[in-house]
Image (cartoon, rainbow, N blue to C red):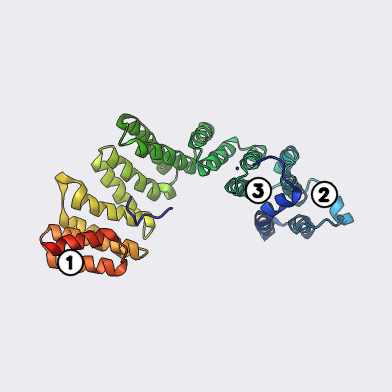
Amino acid sequence: MTSGNRRRLGGLRIPLFNSLAVLLVALFLLTHVFVQDAFSVNWNGVKLTQSLLSGQTRELSSIEQEMAQHNTEPALRWAVTASVAEGDFPSAQATLARYRIAASADQAVLMDSWITSHALALGASGEIGRADQTMRLLFALGNDARAYAGLGQLYQTLGNVDLAQSYLSQSLKIQENAQTYLRLGEIYAQRGLALLETNYPEAKRQLILASNSFESAMRLDAQSGVYASYRLGDIYWKLNRPQDGVKAYRYAAEKGGQSHYAFLSTFYLGQIYSAWWAKNLDYNLAHTYFERALHIAADNREQAMSLSGMAFADASRGQSAQALNEYQEAISRDPDYEPARRALSVLESK
């Protein structure tokens, strides 16, 4: 990728106070989301969760005590968050089994989302053990494919790609899912690209696996198409399948609107026709793609990239004066864009 590309853990026993601190933001979001009208949560249930959120140690009112003894969604939700805060995962798991019965489908989805986000937050803070145990609570919600996918996501963010691949693959054996295919494709692509210079046969094998995963994501979900096509463009190019690469980039460029991946795909099409595809160079077409990229560029760096591409195409077709102006304009948009500075210096010396 070019420089304009965006870039896109702990023991099991910790004090309750620290657990509550880690949970603070996640519990607030959980409480706020669950009190929407669509879920008809009564105010007593909200007070239960808020008492945990605020760290209050007061004795529960008689109404709250009675409520906590019943299998109501708010009471069970409070019990789950309290157990997670205390690190009592067996209790949290048992309560979630009851929660599945009391909660609506939409409430169960929100609980899934909270467990996932909290586990990822724990992982990011270095508490791998607690993060793993928290993510495993998804099994108690009754969707094993989702639970394995969550574990895969956790370990992928932690950089343990071998374990992540294992969990993601297990998830897909149970149920196909576009996002899970995208995550697995990222792992294969990362491995393949890293091996291109040292072990091409294995790099090719990994990249083929990546392309299969991205193609599966596109098959299942059109919304995944732009990003998957952008990644496929690069992978096909690395696999010496230039026609397929061009086709994939064009799809992302045409369907992506003004998104970042549409910009990159359009820019790379310009690169293909101005420099990469020796047998099919077309500077006029390349210039057109760079102009389109400039139109949807989101920042000064992307504008400088596009203008530099236009300048290269113009210089290649003998329009040196126009190329000089475009390089200068690129530098004015982003003074730190070195490719434009170097190219301008070379052009001025001729």
- Element class at badge 1: helix
Q: Position of residue 290 (x, y in %)?
A: 25, 59
Label 1, label 2: how far apart the Cα atoms are: 74 Å
Name the residue: 32% across, 50% down. Answer: 251
- Element class at badge 2: helix
The numbered mark, 3 or 1, whose residue comes first in the sequence reads 3
Q: Which residue is mark 3?
A: 111
- The single residue placed furthest to the top in the displayed view is 201
Name the residue: 12% across, 58% down. Answer: 317
Q: Which residue is mark 2?
A: 68
Q: Amino acid at mark 1?
A: Leu
Q: Which residue is mark 1?
A: 324
Label 3, label 1: how far apart the Cα atoms are: 58 Å
Q: Amino acid at mark 2?
A: Ala
The vertical placement of 341 against 240, above or below, is: below
Locate residue 44 relative to residue 130 in the image: left or right: right
Q: Position of residue 205 (x, y in %)?
A: 35, 31
Disc 2: CA contacts within 10 A as few (<14), some (14-19) or many (>=20): many
